Every structure is written in C-alpha cells, then in structure tokens.
Amino acid sequence: MYSFRTTGFNGYAVQYSPFFDSRLACAASANFGLVGNGRLYVLGLTPSGIVAEKWFDTQDGLFDCAWSEIHENQIVTATGDGSVKLFDITLNDYPVQSWREHTREVFSANWNLVEKTTFCTSSWDGLIKIWSPVRPKSIATLQPRDAPLSCTYAASYSPYNATLIASCSSDSYLRLWDPRVGDFPTNSVYAHSGAEILSLDWNKYRPDIVATSSVDRTIKIWDLRFMNRTSPALPAMSNASPLNELYGHNYAVRKIAWSPHASELLLSASYDMTARVWEDKSAFKQSATQSSITRLHHGGGLRGVWDRHSEFVVGCDWSLWGAEGWVCTVGWDEMVWVWDIRTVLR
C-alpha cells in the first residue's frame, strides 16, 4: 500500500502507464474543480513510496487524462475550459498540442487501444470528438440528435473494435457509435431509468459486455447484442434489461473499471468515500439468452471495500503489471492510493 498527497489539488482521474509498471498519471483541480488551476502529475512508484517525477500546471481544472498508446511519454488531458491538451513529459511547462473545439467542460479522454493513433473526448456540451495527435482539428464529431442538451460524461473505445465507441450521458442513455456508419448512435438503451450515468467501461475479455454506473448508486452490466438499433429516423427506445445489477454503494458511483486480469472482476469509486471490488456472476453464465440470466440480489457480488479515502473517490484504475490485483484510486481528499485488492477480498 502506497500513498501520495496532491496538496492543494483535488484528484479527478488516475491511470497507470501502458508502457511502464512504475508510472502513473493523475489529473487534479484546485477548489474541487469549481474555479482555479489544474495540475497533471506524473508519479513514480519507488521502493520507498510514490514520488512526483513531474507536473504541469494548467489555467483551468483537469477532469481526466489518458496515456498515449503509441508514445510512452505523452498524455492527453480533459480540461474545464473546453480545451484538450497533449503533454510530453520529457519537455517542460507547456503542452505540445492544444485543441479548443468543445464549448463546455471536457469530462473524459480515452485513447484507442486497437488502432492506437486516435483518441476521443466527451464534454458537457454533449459532443464526442475524435482526434489525432498530429492533426490541428478533430477528425469527427458525434452528437445524440434526440438529446442535444445532455452532458456526455464519458466515451470509450472498444478494446476489440477500432471504430466502436460507447458513451453515457446525463439523459440516462448508454449509446453505441460507429463513425463509419455516421455521426448518429447505432444502438442505445435507457440504462438507469432517468438517473445520470457517470461512467462506463468495456469488459476486457467479453467483447459485447459494457458496465455502467450512475447517480442511482448502482452498477449495471449490459450485453450490447440486446441493445436497440437506432438511426436518424428512429429515435432512441428501450426494452433491454441488464445482465446484472450490483448494489452496495451509498451514493453515486463516479467511476468503474473492469479488471485486465479476470473477466468477472470490477472496481468502482464512489461519492460514499469508498472504492469497492465486485464479482460479476453473470460472467459465469453459459447461455447468451436474457431469459437464462439470474440477477444478483441487493449487495450480491461485493467482494471488498477500500475505505481509506476521506472524501469523494472519483477515479480508479488497474495495474497491467506484476501481481494481479494492484489498483490505484484518487479522491477529493487530495490523496492517491495504490493498493492490492487481495487485502480487502472476502
């Protein structure tokens, strides 16, 4: 167990480097992101603890960050002033690229794991934008036409398909996009009965499985094969049911992340000041039909609780390296924790 204090800055996101087992990136904001500067930390894991190898200050708060999948020293950030910035940690002070096309806070950034030369961002302006680090403008813009005023809290590339993007929004919809088809969602589901969806993640072993988390305190597991087809002429509808529902958090679930080592394990971060480890038992079902799925009961699937944070826990990630089970979390208490889930499993 290791910790690092982001003094004067409240954490929003944390991510392990895909290239180095001892390096993390952390996006943070002064004054809880309401007003003031942001700071991108590059943290190193050493035998004596976590050290700040470098940091970059920004004029507005940072809400997310994502390591480049093609350049081991580059990180893209999502900024409160609507800009998207690319930093090279071998250089000082300033980003190597900056784009400003979003009109409101950029809330998520996600790098393409398959094609690797593009990344996407989502914003409170409702838009999803696709970028290349070598182009001066975005490649494409995606917007739900049936809900143009909704906030898109997160957008994430499929780890199996280079063009497939899933997004979640304040209008409670989980949407699927394929820019090859057009700038409209190809599938959608009204996932949380009107509650805002704050986070989503693709399962790393089951190509059709996506998890969502919401202000309704639940985590839901979805099979994309059962989502409704949509088109510009066909508005979003909903009759799909989740494969599983995970209950246990006392407040909104701000961030979720599937394990890179086990198809059934999921990590969550919540405003109830805890991070939790879950076992999705629908992963063990053999049939692909919804009628054969048995949902977990309230609290079912909970494997462990991490309660060392003293404020909202808003970011989490799994280590790709070393012994399976090492994770990191970040919160508004100005703390980054690196810990082993095996210390809390029951």
Image (spheres, rainbow, N blue to C red):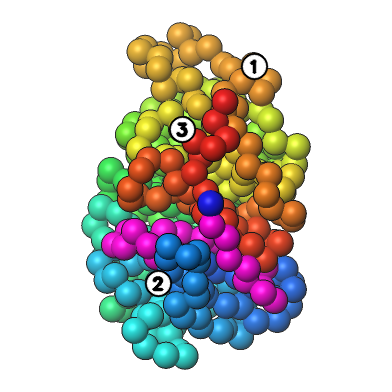
Which badge, 1 or 3, comes first in the chain's sequence?
A: 3
- Residue beneath disc 2: 75
Q: CA distance from mark 3 to mark 2?
A: 27 Å
Q: Residue 192, which numbered label?
A: none
Which badge, 3 or 2, comes first in the chain's sequence?
A: 2
Could you say which is closer to the camera, residue 218 or residue 241? 218
- Residue beneath disc 1: 297
Q: At x 65% / y 34%, what residue is drawn?
A: 218
From the image, which quarter does the C terminus lie in? top right
Q: Please provide percent x and percent y for residue 133.
A: 32, 75
Tell me which corner region of the image, top left, top right, bottom left or bottom right, holds residue 103.
bottom right
Q: Please provide percent x and percent y for residue 270.
A: 67, 46
Q: CA distance from mark 1 to mark 3?
A: 17 Å
What SS does tag 3 mark? strand
Q: CA distance from mark 1 to mark 2?
A: 40 Å
Give the magenta part as a residue range. 2-25
- Residue beneath disc 3: 265
Q: At x 33% / y 48%, what residue is drawn?
A: 322
Q: Is residue 10 visible?
A: yes
Which badge, 1 or 2, comes first in the chain's sequence?
A: 2
Q: Nearer the viewer, mark 3 or mark 2?
A: 3
Local packing at callout 2 (Cα closer than 10 Å; few below 14, some 14-19, many 20+) is many
Q: Please provide percent x and percent y for residue 251.
A: 75, 41
The kind of residue on which mark 3 rests is Leu
| Circles 1 and 3: CB atoms closer than 8 Å | no
Q: At x 57% / y 77%, what residue is drawn?
A: 39
Could you say which is closer to the camera, residue 296 or residue 54? 54
Tell me which corner region of the image, top left, top right, bottom left or bottom right, holds residue 31.
bottom right
Q: Nearer the viewer, mark 1 or mark 3?
A: 3
